[in-house]
Amino acid sequence: MEKQELTIPNHVSIVMDGNGRWAKEHGKPRTFGHKKGAEVVMDLCRDADDLGIKYLTIYAFSTENWKRAESEVRALMSLFGTYLKICHREALEHHMCVRVIGDTSALASDLQDLIRVLEDDTRDFDGLHLQIAINYGSRDEMLRAMRALLRDYEAGPFDAKDLDESMFSGYLDTAGIPDPDLMIRTSGEMRLSNYLLWQHAYSEFYFTDTLWPDFDKKELIRAIEAYNRRDRRYGKAN
C-alpha cells in the first residue's frame, strides 16, 4: 500500500516499551537502552510529520515508574533533562508545538524549568503537536481533574446537568487536544498500563513485537496500514 493511498491518523499515541530488553539483548545496561530509545523519538517526530500526522503523544515515564531501582530513575531523570534540551532545539527548527502532560510538580525544579521554557517557546507553532507524558498516570490525571472541577464548583456552583464529557475533558491534561485515533505499543505487551484511559475510548490499538529502540518509519507505516484495515465506526474526526 503506497503512502498516498493511506488514510493518515490525525493523532497517534505510543507506549514506548522494550528499552530494557533491547539493552539486555545487546549486552548493555538498561540505561543504554533508554538512551537509545530517546534518540528514536526525534526520528519518529520527523517521520510522523512527514507522513502527515498532526498529533503525537509518547509515554515517557509513568507514575508507577518511580518504583523502579533508584539508580535507573536517576538515570532517566538525567536523560529527560538532556532530551528536553534536544527537543527544544528540534522544536524551534521544525516548528513543533510541545506539551508535557502529567504531574510535573513531582519533578526536580530544573526539569520543571526546562519544561516551562519548552512549552512557552513552542506553544504558538503550527507544526507537529508533540505531547510527552512524564510522571503521567491516567487514574492520577482523572483524580487531579476531578479535584480541579470540585474547586471550581466550590468557588461558584454550577448545575450538575452541565457536567458532560466535553466539560470533564477540559480538566484533563490533554484539554484542547483531539483524542488519539491510533495507539501503538511496542515489545509485544498488550495492555494500556494506565495510559490515556479516557482518551483511548474509541482508539484503534496496534501491538508489535518490535522493541522500541528498533522502531522506525517502516514500523510506523505498518501500524498505519493496519489502522487502514480497521472498520472505524466511532471516534472518527468530524
Image: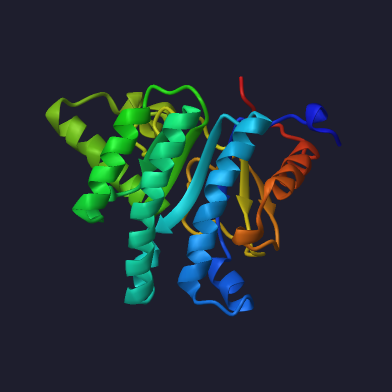
Res 13 visible: no
Decide which of 165, 25 is in the foreground and name it.
25
Figure quadrant of residue 107: bottom left
Image quarter for residue 15? bottom right
Horizontal arrangement in the rendering, residue 104 relative to residue 83 (left or right):
left
On the picture, is 221 further left or further right than 30? Answer: right
- Spot occupied by residue 129 in the image (x, y as percentages of width and height): 48, 32
Residue 31, x across and y down, in percent: 46, 70
Q: Residue furthest right?
A: 1
Please determine whether, in this image, residue 100 is positioned above or below residue 206.
above
Q: Quadrant of the N terminus?
A: top right
Task: Specify the quadrant that holds the C terminus.
Answer: top right
> In the image, 173: left or right of 1?
left
Closer to the camera, 13 or 122? 122
Spot the residue most to the left: 155
Residue 79, picture quadrant? bottom left
Q: Is residue 29 visible?
A: yes
> Foreground residue, 123 or 141?
123
Say above or below: 226 vs 175.
below
Seen at 72% across and 50% down, the residue is: 219
Scheme of image coloration: rainbow
**Image point 33% across, 61% down: which residue?**
78
Q: Classify 85 as above or below 4.
A: below
Residue 65 percent location from the top left of the image: 39, 65
What residue occupies the far top of the structure in this picture? 238
Q: Is residue 52 left or right of residue 108?
A: right
Q: So how many labels did they put on this image?
A: 0
Residue 25 position in % (x across, y down): 64, 77
Q: Residue at x 41, y 38 (%)?
A: 89
